[in-house]
Image: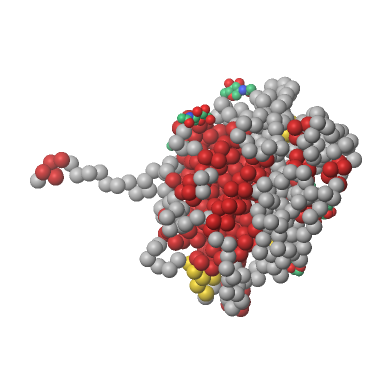
Amino acid sequence: MHHHQLTCIIIRRAGMMLLVATFLAASTIHASPPTPSPNSYTLALHKALMFFNAQRSGKLSDHNHVLWRGDSCLTDGKPSTAGSPTSDLVGGYYDAGNSIKFNFPASFAMTMLSWSVIEYNAKYEAAEELTHIKDVIKWGTDYFLKTFNNSADTIDRIVSQVGLGNTDGGKDTTPNDINCWMRPEDIDYTRPVTECHACSDLAAEMAASLAAASIVFKDNRTYSKKLVHGAKALFKFSRDSRGHYSSGSSDAALFYNSTSYWDEYVWASTWLYYATGNSSYLQLATTPALAKHATFSQAPNQYWPNHGVLSWDNKLVGAQVLLTRLRLFLNPGYPYETTLRRFHNETNTIMCSYLPAFTIFNRTRGGLIQLNRGHLRRPRPLEYVVNAAFLATVYSDYLEAADSTKPAGLHCGPNFFSVDVLRDFAKTQIDYILGRNPQKMSYVVGFGNHFPKQVHHRGASIPKKKIKYSCKGGWKWRGSLKPNPYTIVGAMVAGPDKHDGFHDVRANYNYTEPTLVGNAGLVAALVALSGDRTTDGIDKNTMFSAIPPMFPTPPPPPPSASKA
Ligand SMILES: *[C@@H]1O[C@H](CO)[C@@H](O)[C@H](O)[C@H]1NC(C)=O
Ligand SMILES: *[C@@H]1O[C@H](CO)[C@@H](O)[C@H](O)[C@H]1NC(C)=O
Ligand SMILES: *[C@@H]1O[C@H](CO)[C@@H](O)[C@H](O)[C@H]1NC(C)=O
Ligand SMILES: *[C@@H]1O[C@H](CO)[C@@H](O)[C@H](O)[C@H]1NC(C)=O
Ligand SMILES: *[C@@H]1O[C@H](CO)[C@@H](O)[C@H](O)[C@H]1NC(C)=O
Ligand SMILES: *[C@@H]1O[C@H](CO)[C@@H](O)[C@H](O)[C@H]1NC(C)=O
Ligand SMILES: *[C@@H]1O[C@H](CO)[C@@H](O)[C@H](O)[C@H]1NC(C)=O
């Protein structure tokens, strides 16, 4: 029943796209001007990864390489609430310009980084960043393991957040991570711990994150097993205690309001399948009802406004690309084929929608695709763009690797587009971010010679001198019109407005604030585009290393038969 409905709707949508394809077919693709060399993507990658070092909370190693940062928030989780398994919450990452630790976006950021490592191990190695990125991921996963009872098979709570922002529109004067402007190293106010007891979206994203990381760390069996164990417990919790982690007027609802948990169900069960090889997770991921709920999260028959756009809120398209990977490379057939074929088709449709030949999404005059259709809390275009650039690139690589006998590409209605067109989409978007835009400005701090100087970031904007600025005393630095005293290398800011305009003003977070999720997508897109794909292409097999052979090979003939 559900199954049938989904088929109809997808076909109807595909029909709509076909129409669009027919009328708007590709005549507007300009001959692309020379693009930055793969080396500049590698250079940007080195920088983009450094942002994670700048966001670290807790006790830093001597090799953190961000000289203006030091140890901070060493008492997070203390004193612990009675009965809480989580009294040590030291570590993890600050979300953005503030110092809140939000598990929801942070775990999505780590999932994206792990995905990029599993595919592009060889490119990270060629860029001499493999150790670094694994270290970045482990800093995140080690912290997530502290936020629930990771020795239990069954859990009933997760710490969703440490630190607090304005839940009352700024009227609350209790010092916190938003109404104070302080270096994290100087924080002297209380950082409350938020726990959730029914948070399917958060628990599933954390499960995805630990499952993906277990593949990254598969060479360390102890750690990898611990991650898988945690992922299973989180996912079970996510399924058993249904609820939204961001309900009511919590900080979570204000900053990262999750629309639905159905997309996280598809995404997490896909990752759990890859991490464990247990086909019950694949069965769940390909259950038509899940994808249907994830597609039409609110009103029936109405597409979720950000359908086809991968973000901290919506992971369905990410799961569809991952499952299309399975169909292209392992082709498991019955009973998964019906849904996998549909996901493959839907993935193609979404990839087509990114191409400049179509007007599914608007673009700025300077060419930046507008994927955030105004439904989400803030403009911040770039964090959506980098994810689309990553998906387009990795999908191009899949198509090429799947069948080397044919020219690789996809059909959008009657038109065939080679994978180069899809890669060009990714390149033009990333090139825009790196400086090929009307402002001639790089939106990645420290890359190129013109980049934002007033990044909305507490640590980078307050001079680290002998003076310790108080909660309110630090606000003069927030409002200062001078450049930040420290260059927060690699931070990708929120980005320009829909007219390619940009105001390099610290107080305006809509332009100048970086985030973990933004940089995770950037890192993933950059590594995908970097280096040489003929020598260091995607790794087809590591993703599937836990999956038993699909079609068991027949046993060898008995010795007597071979003698005869
Ligand atoms: C964590 O789970 C283990 C195993 O179920 C249990 O023995 C332990 O008491 C739990 N810890 C806390 C603090 O609840
Ligand atoms: C495996 O990971 C654990 C947990 O981080 C670590 O303590 C251990 O040293 C690692 N083992 C190896 C062989 O790298
Ligand atoms: C968060 O999302 C829920 C449903 O998705 C909605 O009802 C609620 O109003 C949103 N909250 C905020 C603060 O935007
Ligand atoms: C696969 O996962 C399901 C659901 O978690 C579980 O019930 C089952 O025992 C697992 N099967 C194996 C072979 O581990
Ligand atoms: C998706 O499937 C529909 C129905 O079979 C087909 O008409 C359409 O061309 C397909 N779309 C893509 C992009 O493959
Ligand atoms: C494109 O821009 C127009 C005008 O601002 C707007 O009405 C429309 O909703 C946008 N379309 C999309 C898909 O974002
Ligand atoms: C940022 O954008 C939001 C949403 O458009 C808007 O409500 C808010 O006032 C803007 N903030 C600033 C500082 O401009």
Classify residue 432 by image quadrant. Answer: bottom right
Q: Quadrant of the N terminus?
A: bottom right
Name the residue rendered at 70%, 30% in the picture.
71
- Residue 64 is situated, as x and y percent measured from the top left of the image, at 62, 36
Numbered label tally: 0
Q: Is residue 401 left or right of 106 when viewed as pictured? A: left
Foreground residue, 61 or 179? 61
**Does residue 381 show up?**
no
Foreground residue, 171 or 426? 426
- Residue 405 is situated, as x and y percent measured from the top left of the image, at 37, 66
Q: Is residue 553 left or right of 399 when viewed as pictured? A: left
**Does residue 79 show up?**
yes
Name the residue rendered at 49%, 34% in the picture.
224
Foreground residue, 245 or 9? 245
Foreground residue, 450 or 38? 450
Name the residue rendered at 49%, 69% in the picture.
418
- Residue 523 is situated, as x and y percent measured from the top left of the image, at 59, 50
Classify residue 329 by image quadrant. Answer: bottom left
Name the residue rendered at 61%, 45% in the picture.
49
The furthest residue to the left: 564
- Residue 195 is situated, as x and y percent measured from the top left of the image, at 71, 32
The structure's colour scheme is secondary structure
